[in-house]
Image (cartoon, grey):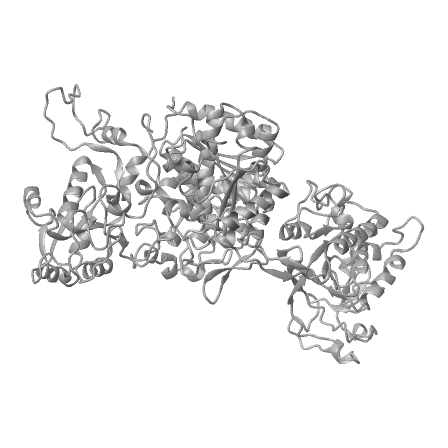
């Protein structure tokens, strides 16, 4: 049972569902004071990102109300909404978000009774579900006062940005929950790496040098010029490290997709920590031999780090000055980022150090994009080879290129595979997954059921459109049980 | 209400007031006075449904010298007070809704008001009895009628039927005089061999793309003598009339047809299939044969459209009876008008007093395109549709341009064309020169579907921007307002 009455964010088309809500009041169909209504011109205006935002900010449910099929004054805005929302709700369901939380309903202007009934039903269903823990509104990487982190005093204009005039800048590399690919990305600098080592003093780099936590703790605050932190924050210990490095560093850089958005690691949130531990160490895992399953007992000392309830991108733990995106960041992007960060005017304010332009614009397949893309069928890479030389979206293959930043090149599309968005969203996209669901869901054609069928045919929408951004974009969910 | 209207509760508002009857003339004057006296630049009004008086309050704002777009009406009557339930629940919800109104209105921007001159001209699709009667009624000073006919001669079913009327008059006796009148009418343009290939725009400003197949004879020059037909060396069975009789490769569409101009069958003419024969061209005394004529595409700018595409007899193998003319389904789709289950076009319009009207303003259906009709009824339909148009569309009339038409943010647009796919009105194209989306405001209806489709945030949906809706959501869910 919820502690409070459910809150429903209701996007209502002004011609039909909004008029029906008026009609419900006019006819005095008593129903719960639950809908928090936004009047929209058409259900087709409702972008998936707004639904995700509502859930993230504590809505218990979302209602999208449009006209009955055939009645839309914009021809088929309602069907477009249904197609997009099908993709979105399937992704949410993958994470255990109950289907009752997001409803798309066709409500005619004179159907006040139906509107009241839907609201009443929805409130009853939502009351039976756990309350949504509200989360602060999503922000771009937290902005810091120009050029500084926590505890840092602004230096004089002539003082430069360095730890001390004339000394080599101190840098740190650290890894949280990551695969090691980001370390490789640094090694891949090749000949530039020894130059960097000569130019800067590396005080911490677990993959390459022996430095102890105590040594970092012993440094004065702000002693490190730039700390590159890769990996998502998955453990309490990683959050501690992030905070320690924040304190000791003038600039903290989220390095790689996991630090920026949660990355692949964030997909673990589809199942939650218990299911992850079960899958890795549970009694049913064939490689685990633990007869009697002894676990920790009271009084035991178990100084192992604890899994956090969900994956956190670095900027959810500490303010981040700059982001080097990618999985992994490409060599040119790393080179440019290093040059910029070690320069006299290093970037700050959460700047993403990759071109703020869509991958689509440099895609080798861009000339094959149809004038009016329209999907009649979806294709799966698992069962069909993509047609060479043809835009993936035009073939019915999900590709996140439009919403994704450049910086990988040559990357997946050059290698004949669709983009999965590892360089993160362009600045206008908002949540990359939601943006691509809005776009991809707009390409389906046919009548209402056909479009919904097409949208439902895409396997794994969460892992497709939110492959790298689930943790950053999606609402936290109380999970009950495994999948 | 008094509690809600306490200024202390709304620190972000410069002025809070209550009026008992805001929509009455004295209320409107009071509102305008407040705006002037307090120098308000934005107003939130908690009142009845915006469907009732939004226009009234926007008018008050304009009276007071600010744009009507700076008014946000929050629905406290139909959707809060009349919903019923505990008064406290209603009050707290009202507060949330008002807070959202304030958050939203702060982001409102004035939208420019633009007008274009409407076209008084009318396109009649189909040159049968219904279309002819519509065109005849419409054409006159200040208004052109374009009649397009798929066949190469006018008159449709009636022109080739022995006794279409009970009084025994022959079909061509009924329609030929009218065809002749229209062919020589200064305000009528007849295009034969023509089919609609695209329709954009709305009432008062449709752009209709028409494809004209070649006749290979210049109808303006041809005098109707039989010299070319007699000279043609290609003769074969006349498949059009069931194989009875012989027919030359250049021949009249049918005996007694109007316009009385022969045409070349490109399937049979040897010259058009690469041969050297020029017999017809050599025989023509007025140099009217055009062996090099190709398919032409023409765009007609009209204010209204009458669909009079007729019907055809049932297939030989199928059930007897009429069925919609071939291609009328595709035309209905281009026009976005409805069709009945049997495929005939929907002429039910918005009500019983609008016969021949469709669900799309400015598009009418006349004659047997809407179902079996007698010749008399078809002619009456044509006049009915024309009469409605004469009543609605006046020469010189100016129409507002959709203020909600988005302006593409070219810096963000990646040219993926998801918006093109999302637009039901064909109002968006990808500009081949810039590879950016471009919105034709005259074709846009302001539904906002493109904004939900755009993966890069390049489509702003004026007055329904992502920023405005996001601010509304955040305010609706913000804590501190009770349940």
Instruction: List x then y, in percent, for residue B461.
Output: 49, 51
Instruction: List x then y, in percent, for residue B311.
Output: 75, 50
Instruction: List x then y, in percent, for residue B275.
Output: 66, 75
Query: Residue at image x 60%, y 35%?
Result: A108
Query: Residue at image x 78%, y 59%?
Result: B138
In this picture, is B250 found above or below A407? below
Q: Is residue A286 left or right of residue B190?
A: left
Residue B259 visible in rendering:
no
Quadrant for the C terminus of chain B in the image = top left
Instruction: List x then y, in percent, for residue A20.
Output: 58, 34
In this picture, is A93 found above or below A417? above
Q: Is residue B366 left or right of residue A401?
A: right
Query: Residue at image x 28%, y 48%?
Result: A141
Q: Is residue A200 left or right of residue B117?
A: left
Residue A193 visible in rendering:
yes
Please tell me in which quadrant of the rendered image residue B339 appears. top right
Q: Is residue A406 left or right of residue B98?
A: left
Count of numbered badges drawn on the protein: 0
């Amino acid at each position: 049972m919820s502690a409070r009455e459910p809150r429903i964010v209701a996007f209502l088309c002004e011609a039909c569902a909004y008029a029906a809500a008026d009609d419900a009041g006019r006819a005095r169909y008593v129903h719960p004071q639950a809908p928090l209504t936004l009047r929209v011109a058409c259900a087709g205006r409702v972008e998936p990102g707004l639904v995700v935002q509502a859930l993230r900010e504590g809505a218990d449910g979302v209602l999208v109300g449009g006209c009955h099929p055939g009645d839309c004054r914009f021809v088929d805005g309602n069907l477009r909404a249904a197609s997009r929302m099908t993709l979105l709700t399937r992704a949410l369901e993958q994470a255990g978000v109950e289907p009752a939380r997001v409803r798309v309903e066709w409500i005619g202007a004179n159907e006040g009774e139906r509107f009241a009934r839907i609201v009443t039903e929805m409130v009853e269903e939502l009351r039976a579900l756990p309350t949504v823990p509200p989360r602060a509104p999503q922000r771009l990487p937290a902005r810091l006062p120009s050029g500084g982190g926590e505890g840092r005093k602004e230096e004089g204009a002539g003082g430069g940005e360095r730890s001390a005039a004339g000394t080599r800048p101190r840098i740190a590399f650290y890894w949280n929950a990551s695969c090691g690919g980001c370390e490789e990305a640094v090694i891949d600098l090749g000949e530039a790496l020894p130059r960097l080592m000569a130019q800067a003093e590396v005080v911490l780099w677990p993959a390459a040098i022996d430095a102890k936590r105590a040594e970092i703790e012993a440094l004065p605050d702000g002693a490190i010029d730039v700390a590159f932190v890769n990996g998502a924050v998955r453990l309490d210990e990683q959050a501690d490290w992030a905070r320690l490095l924040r304190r000791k560093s003038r600039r903290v850089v989220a390095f790689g997709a996991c630090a920026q958005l949660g990355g692949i690691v964030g997909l673990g949130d589809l199942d939650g920590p218990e299911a992850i531990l079960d899958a890795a160490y549970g009694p049913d895992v064939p490689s685990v031999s633990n007869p009697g399953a002894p676990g920790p007992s009271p009084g035991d000392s178990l100084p192992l780090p604890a899994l956090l309830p969900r994956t956190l991108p670095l900027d959810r733990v500490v303010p981040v000055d700059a982001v080097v995106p990618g999985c992994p960041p490409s060599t040119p992007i790393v080179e440019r980022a290093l040059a910029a960060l070690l320069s006299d005017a290093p970037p700050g304010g959460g700047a993403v150090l990759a071109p703020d332009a869509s991958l689509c614009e440099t895609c080798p397949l861009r000339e094959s994009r149809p004038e009016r893309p329209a999907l009649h069928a979806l294709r799966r890479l698992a069962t069909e080879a993509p047609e060479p030389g043809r835009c993936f979206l035009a073939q019915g293959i999900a590709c996140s290129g439009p919403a994704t930043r450049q910086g990988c090149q040559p990357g997946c599309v050059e290698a004949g595979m669709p983009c999965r968005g590892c360089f993160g969203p362009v600045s206008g996209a908002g949540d990359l997954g939601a943006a691509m669901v809005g776009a991809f869901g707009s390409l389906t054609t046919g009548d209402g059921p056909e479009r919904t069928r097409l949208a439902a045919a895409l396997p794994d929408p969460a892992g497709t459109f939110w492959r790298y951004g689930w943790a950053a974009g999606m609402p936290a969910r109380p999970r009950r049980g495994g999948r | 209400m008094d509690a809600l209207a306490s200024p202390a509760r709304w620190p972000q508002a410069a002025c809070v007031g209550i009026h008992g009857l805001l929509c009455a003339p004295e209320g409107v004057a009071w509102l305008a006075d407040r705006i002037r006296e307090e120098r308000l630049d934005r107003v939130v009004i908690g009142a009845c449904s915006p469907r009732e008086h939004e226009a009234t309050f926007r008018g008050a704002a304009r009276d007071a010298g600010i744009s009507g777009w700076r008014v946000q009406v929050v629905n406290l009557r139909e959707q809060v007070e009349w919903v019923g339930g505990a008064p406290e629940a209603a009050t707290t919800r009202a507060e949330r809704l008002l807070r959202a109104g304030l958050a939203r209105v702060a982001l409102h921007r004035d939208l420019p008001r633009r007008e274009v001159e409407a076209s008084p001209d009318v396109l009649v699709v189909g040159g049968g009895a219904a279309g002819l009667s519509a065109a005849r009624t419409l054409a006159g000073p200040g208004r052109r009628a374009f009649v397009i006919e798929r066949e190469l001669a006018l008159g449709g079913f009636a022109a080739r039927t022995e006794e279409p009327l009970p009084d025994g008059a022959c079909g061509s006796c009924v329609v030929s005089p009218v065809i002749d009148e229209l062919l020589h009418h200064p305000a009528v343009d007849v295009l034969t061999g023509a089919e609609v290939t695209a329709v954009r725009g709305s009432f008062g400003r449709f752009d209709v793309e028409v494809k004209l197949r070649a006749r290979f004879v210049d109808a303006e020059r041809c005098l109707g003598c039989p010299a070319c037909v007699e000279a043609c060396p290609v003769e074969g069975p006349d498949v059009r009339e069931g194989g009875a009789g012989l027919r030359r490769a250049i021949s009249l569409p049918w005996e007694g047809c109007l316009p009385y101009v022969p045409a070349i069958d490109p399937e049979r003419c040897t010259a058009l299939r690469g041969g050297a024969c020029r017999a017809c061209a050599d025989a023509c005394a007025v140099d009217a044969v055009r062996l090099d004529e190709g398919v032409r595409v023409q765009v007609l700018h009209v204010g209204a459209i009458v669909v009079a595409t007729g019907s055809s007899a049932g297939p030989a193998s199928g059930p007897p009876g009429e069925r919609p003319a071939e291609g009328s389904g595709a035309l209905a789709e281009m026009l976005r008008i409805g069709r009945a289950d049997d495929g005939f076009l929907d002429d039910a319009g918005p009500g019983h007093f609008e016969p021949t009207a469709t669900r799309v303003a400015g598009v009418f259906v006349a004659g047997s395109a809407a179902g079996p009709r007698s010749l008399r009824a078809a002619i009456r339909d044509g006049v009915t549709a024309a009469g409605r148009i004469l009543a609605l569309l006046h020469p010189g009339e100016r129409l507002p341009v959709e203020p909600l038409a988005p302006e593409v943010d070219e810096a963000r647009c990646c040219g993926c064309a998801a918006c093109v796919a999302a637009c039901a009105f064909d109002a968006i194209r990808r500009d081949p020169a810039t590879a950016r989306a471009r919105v034709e405001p005259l074709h846009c209806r302001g539904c906002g579907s493109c904004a939900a489709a755009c993966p890069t945030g390049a489509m702003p949906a004026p007055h329904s921007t992502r920023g405005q809706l996001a601010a509304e959501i955040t305010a609706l869910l913000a804590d501190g307002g009770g349940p």
